[in-house]
Image (cartoon, grey):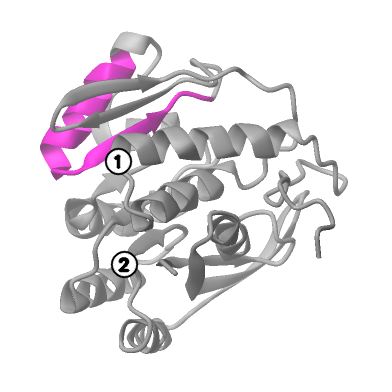
Amino acid sequence: MKTALTIAGSDSSGGAGIQADIKTMTMHGVYGMSAVTALTAQNTLGVTDVMEATPEFLAAELDAVFTDIFPDAVKTGMVASSALIRVIVDKLKQYGAKNIVVDPVMVATNGAKLICDEAIETLKTKLLPIADVITPNRPEAEVLTGMKIATVADMELAARQIFKEYGCAVLLKGGHDLNDANDLLWNASGAHWFYGKKIDNPNTHGTGCTLSSAIASNLALGLSLEDSVKEAKDYISLALSDKLDLGRGKGPMNHAFKVKNEV
């Protein structure tokens, strides 16, 4: 069995973070493992508290995984401090991690910054250059490039700039009212558009986490980056189309839409 590691925060409601990642990896037939960067008290209405892991404990988590069950792919998500980002970079380099997918969680859908400027700078200078692919949303791409992204042409310009500046492939997600279901991958061979049909479902909690962990799962299975992105988008679409409706706010999608009481 292929294996994948998620380095991210815990979501107590199960819709995002490591819970979404491990569900996604399992549904792809990949054995999922985790290194928790933070505990969050959250539900479909929002986050009420956060307890961050210490750098020492995160390092111990990563040592425990890499020295026993070496992951075929690694996905990183919520990492809120420079110290934790440095630990991740050091450990991924130390163990020669491969197929690194970085979801650069920096900006919420409403535009609010989720990590401090110092951590953003560490993310940009230390973590992004060792990634194989990063998956920013439009506001995050605006932070990375310093430019406003308002059109399809802007998306292509921004993706090319990120690829040239950080040396990693970038999947720039449309969303946020711009090409809602169309994403742009830019790598060494240029632009690759992935078109999708917008699904009328307000319950989209954890879509970013799920997409990046699906890409990591597909890379672990040996798919090319382009095929990994295509398959991940198909998985997200089907999970959203199942129209799961849980909680009083923006609920999660059904990661296990393919499971129909078979056990």
Instruction: Residue 57: give x, y in percent of width and height.
Output: 42, 88
Query: Is 110 in front, or is 248?
Result: 248
Closest to the camera, between mark 1 and mark 2, is 1
Q: Residue at x 36, y 58 (%)?
A: 220
Mark 2: amino acid: Ile
Q: Residues within 10 Å of mark 1 (few under 14, many from 20)?
A: some
Reply yes or no: does residue 162 show up in magenta: yes
Q: Is residue 110 visible?
A: no
Question: Where residue 217 is drawn, which disc sits there?
Answer: none
Side (left or right) of 172 relative to 87 = right
Residue 136 image offset from top left, x and y in percent? 39, 39
* Quarter holding residue 205: top right
**Residue indicated by mark 1:** 225
Q: In the rendering, at what x and y percent does residue 199 appear?
A: 68, 22
At 67% from the left edge and 39% from the top edge, which residue is drawn?
239
Image vertical order of residue 117 relative to residue 10, above or below: above
For this view, does 256 lie left or right of residue 248?
Answer: left
Observer-nearest of 37 and 195: 195
Name which of mark 1 and mark 2 comes first in the sequence: 2
- Toward the viewer: 140 or 259? 259
Is 148 placed above or below 242 here? above
Task: Say which quadrant the C terminus sits in.
Answer: bottom right
User: What residue range appears in magenta?
Assistant: 154-175
Residue type marked 1: Leu
Residue on which the image places disc 2? 85
Q: Residue at x 36, y 36 (%)?
A: 227
